[in-house]
Image (spheres, rainbow, N blue to C red):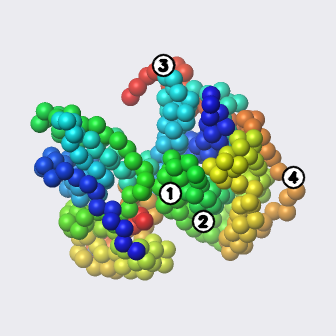
Amino acid sequence: MKNEDLYQYILGIADNSLILGQRLGELCGHGPTLETDIALTNIALDLFGQTRSYYQYAAKLAGGVKTEDDVAMLREEREYRNVLLVEQPNTDFAFVIVRQYLFDEFHLLLMQELQNSKDEMLAAIAKKGIKEVSYHRRFSGDWVKRLGDGTAESNERMQQAVDDLWRYTDELFHLTKADREMIGQGIGVDVSQLRDTYYNTVTELLQEATLTVPEQEYFQKGGKEGIHSEHMGYLLTELQYMQRSYPNMNW
Amino acid sequence: MTVDLAPHIDKHLLPVLRKVSDPEIPVLTVLDLGVIREAVEENGKVYIKLTPTYSGCPAMDVIGDDLKAAFKAIGKEAEIDLVLSPAWSTDWISEEGKRKMEAYGIAPPLEESADKAALLGNKKLVKCTNCGSTNTRLVSQFGSTACKALFQCNDCEEPFDYFKCLK
Ligand SMILES: [Zn+2]
């Protein structure tokens, strides 16, 4: 493929939205209250919408008979480029909210930069996405505060989620080969430059939520290179089940 | 800064466009909603540029199909092109659209700063679509669809949707 790096770069962004959307979709009908259930599935819908735009673009780059559905549904685990954070399971509502917040804060920073991309299509998707992601961040940030600074039980569970998920945050700022190529061409965002702003903002909010920021030196990585956690296989099994069992099926 | 974003629409196509409505808010036509960014006829074929409200809005595929069907009914073929840029804004909903929306039971979007104050600062600014009171409270930032928030009136107890400002 002529634009292999661009193709991989797009997947690096799109797969995060797909996999997190899939995780949130699992909660459809299972949210703790009707309002949060609806909110989380609405966020999933936004993420799927964004990811669809990316995949349509990626499929066009791939050429031939490839469609957005092939790109989304018919890759092997090692070909997905999402970060480990978004594939982590819905352990409890605290995990769902903390995972969401840790991602939303990053996602917003990424979109704000990507809207200046030299690639017009990516810039347009980002501009559209910013508006939506701002709402996501507002929702998840509010819940972090509400539950962190809530009851003893909610605080404890939130702290547990923060402690467990923190190790996946560093990977958000790693650069892949495709990242470096695209940064060089003025298309990609240098996410390593977003790290300080991210940790400052997150730290401030966690403190406001009376949560302790973990002092961690060991971080997990691998998702961006296609090396995923043990949860990913199960997630993909469910995501791909229909297309694998009934190839080319349509609603 | 005022940017002229008025879409280019061939006048003779308006009657057909007026017949196509938003499947989720059927009182609004696609023109009220501001999602038609261009509609022109060339050599007997109609070319339409459609912009989604939200990225994942499931209504968009339906609107595209409905547009094609509406033109087919008058013997014309229509080609739909989905455009993302410039991104849709609630400013593009017509004044008439906002009135129809309110009559339908959905509080129309406030301007940006008032919207923020209502959604973030719990300021009582959103008007109840049932009794008109602004003594209302936010129940959830996400309502029945991604574009709406759920409110409830403190005076008449009516729960209602508020169409969030998107800029
Ligand atoms: Zn009322």
Q: Chain of mark 4?
A: A
Q: Are marks 1 and 4 in contact (CB under 8 Å)?
A: no
Q: N-terminal of the two: label 1 or label 4?
A: 1
Callout 3 and callout 2 share a chain: yes
Task: Report x, y in % for residue B62.
Answer: 30, 41
Picture layout, residue A35 above or below residue B131:
above
Q: Which residue is mark 1?
A: A127
* Residue at the extreme front of the image, as rendered: B43
Callout 1 and callout 4 share a chain: yes
Cα–Cα span, label 1 and label 4: 34 Å
**Disc 3, SS:** loop
Q: Residues within 10 Å of mark 1 (few under 14, many from 20)?
A: many
* Residue at the extreme top of the image, as rendered: A246
Task: Report x, y in % for residue A248.
Answer: 46, 21
Q: Which residue is mark 2?
A: A141
Task: Report x, y in % for residue A45.
Answer: 47, 47
Q: Chain of mark 1?
A: A
Front-lying residue, A108 or A95: A108
Q: N-terminal of the two: label 3 or label 2?
A: 2
Task: Report x, y in % for residue B57.
Answer: 39, 48
Three-letter amino acid code of the residue under disc 2? Gly
Cα–Cα span, label 2 and label 1: 21 Å
Q: Quadrant of residue A79?
A: top right
Three-letter amino acid code of the residue under disc 3? Tyr
Question: Would residue A70 be found to the left or right of residue B68 on screen?
Answer: right
Residue at the spot x=25%, y=64% of the render?
B94
Residue at the spot x=79%, y=44% of the render?
A221
Three-letter amino acid code of the residue under disc 1? Lys
Question: Would residue B105 be found to the left or right of residue A236 on screen?
Answer: left
Residue at the spot x=29%, y=61% of the render?
B6
